[in-house]
Image (tube, coloured by chain):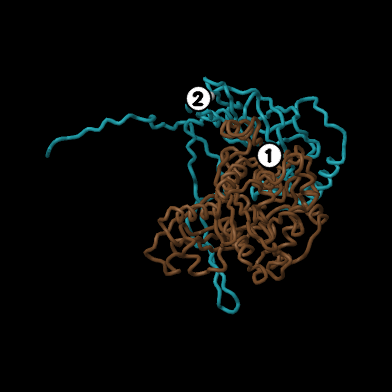
Amino acid sequence: MSGQQIIKKKKKFADEPNFTEKKTYRPNDVKETGLAFVGHEISDDGKVMNQFLHYDQLYTIRHGWNSPFFKGLLDGKIMGTYCPICNDTWVPARTHCWRLNCNLEHTKWVEMPLTAKVHTWTVAGWSGRSSLKRLPIVLIYAIIGDSKVAIANELHKIKPWDVEFGMPLKIVFKPKEERIGAVTDFHFEPIDNWKPSPMNKEKERIKKLVEPVYEWVKTMK
Amino acid sequence: MHFGHQLAPEWIIHDHLGLVGLPHFRVENGGNTGGSALYAAALSVMSGHHDVIGIVGWETMDSVSQSQGAEFIAMASDIRYELMVGGIYPIYYAAMANKWMKDNKVKEEDVASIGAKNRNNAMDNPKAQWYRNEHKYITVDDVMNSRLISYPIKKYDCCLMTRGVAFLLVCSEEYAKKVNPDGYCTIDGNGLSSCTIRAGDRLNNPGWTERYEPNYPEMTEFGACRNSAEQAYKMAGIKNPKKEIDFGEIHDAFSTSEAQIYKALGLADENTIAQFLRDESTHMHGQIPMNPGGGLMGYGHPVGATGIMSTIECFYQLSGMIPKKHLSKKTEVADAECGIVNSHAGTGTSISNFILRRGK
Ligand SMILES: [Zn+2]
């Protein structure tokens, strides 16, 4: 067998992308340091030691077949997918139909309307470290167009206690130059001329719960 | 690199327990890690391949700040769609619970009583984080007046962030009879099921609508809990869980989710759940006490250890060890023969249930 060259023929899954349009919006204070011991402390009796390990890593999230959704955000569009067999539509998008009867059919992309309705909602008075200063946050799950699923995002331009199940919404994008291709590029707002219902017991209750949050946020640096 | 600064720390623990040469592997499944490890251990013993399996779970959540910790946990949500829109788990759960409570006519006070119940139960458990730290009995009003986390959830509707570890031995019944003939319990039923990572994907999901009914589980019900409970009940021969199960240690990440779990376990339906709560059916004096050990809100929620912690509390009840392990008999379920353990991950993304019975 010596000297015989075996050539394997592989079917290519996809061509390797050539990335040409690049954008960086890394804040100046974000530095990748990798792993570093950055300090230690020892108890006064000399018995216990704590050591501080810092770790900072940049991740690449390859969106692959989901890319049109995130690219769409840059253009101020909400892209969904639908199944050409059963016509179910989704935002967040699915790359394949969820029905086993459709045999995981590869879906097609469709531009969704910039209208939605509230499926469920909450008023957050506490959150993760990177969101604390934006509190209180009205987080809703909304159904965009005829999507079969609900998508989470923030509802702005409303008093937190005025949110209602089923209320009609519009989707509002950040100015083009501020968009980063993430779901934070857009938020929901009530449709024009929408009027909240009068105050009631539940609204008073939410108002009472939320008021200290405004005060607390003011004290944050 | 989340709470743990060491990848595969189980390799260190295994070595230091003198177990080099014996098999080890990691089970990781979010908040259902403990339940999933128990599931794997039970199946391994049932298969006849292993006689004795030790399962150990832990979390060191105090290695970072609380808001940073909440954000770490939120990285188990779909980070592409949910993490950056102000989302952390209490917020997702609150959005789900808000609709569930309206659909089921359950009031804030009704679920607040669960928050008070579990913390007060924990006051009888000297290992509980609530006992060791805050150390006070609280009322429904205290829960109602605690600070807003995400409506309708307040601080005392939430579980604790915890540094903790739990260890449990799962073995064949023959082995148990040899080493602990009077104090073992059996795993008579187990079930594990799954749901979508994003709660918003559950409105019309064919995986559920074809199995149960249209519009199930919505964003409100825990389909994976119902499904895994049905598996466990079937295996253990349970037809009427409310009558045949004496108590449970279940995943009260939030008081609202404990109430939602009651329904998923078949203890009440949409017409009876509100009254079931108002009757205090799951308090120590109720028909089916839940979380006598304090649960995640009172005992603590060291994520990787939690399901094992719940199982251990269930085992204590079934083996008559509560008077020794707790401070009094107040939190003992008298003559308990059958308990349920529930372990829960994501927004209900993975849920396991176990039926445990006193050994014969
Ligand atoms: Zn289809």
Query: Which residue occupies 74% across, 30% down?
Result: A166
Type of residue at label 1?
Answer: Thr
Residue toward you, A66 or A107: A107
Type of residue at label 2?
Answer: Cys
Q: Considering only vertical position in the picture, is B333 above or below A180? A: below
Instruction: Confirm whether residue B282 shows in the render.
Output: yes
Query: Which residue occupies 47% across, 33% down?
Result: A64
* Whether label 1 touches label 2, CB < 8 Å: no
Residue B257: x %, y % from top left: 69, 47
* Chain bearing mark 1: B
Instruction: Confirm whether residue B156 shows in the render.
Output: no
- Label 2 residue SS: helix
Name the residue beneath numbered marker 1: B220
Residue toward you, A196 or A36: A196
Query: Can you say which quadrant of the picture contains the N terminus of chain A?
Result: top left
Residue toward you, B178 or A189: B178
In the picture, one chain is cyan; tell me its letter: A
Q: Is residue B43 left or right of residue B198?
A: left
Q: Quick one: label 2, few (<14), some, or many (20+) residues within 10 Å?
A: some
Mark 1–mark 2 Cα distance, whole angstroms, equals 27 Å
Which residue is most to the front? B360
Residue A189: x %, y % from top left: 73, 31
* Chain bearing mark 2: A
Residue toward you, B84 or B73: B73
- Disc 2 C-beta below 8 A from ligand 1: yes
Marks 1 and 2 share the same chain: no
Query: Which residue occupies 75% across, 41% down?
Result: B101
Q: Is residue A207 left or right of residue B218?
A: right
- Label 1 residue SS: loop
Q: Considering only vertical position in the picture, is B318 above or below B267? A: below
Label of residue A102 in the image: 2
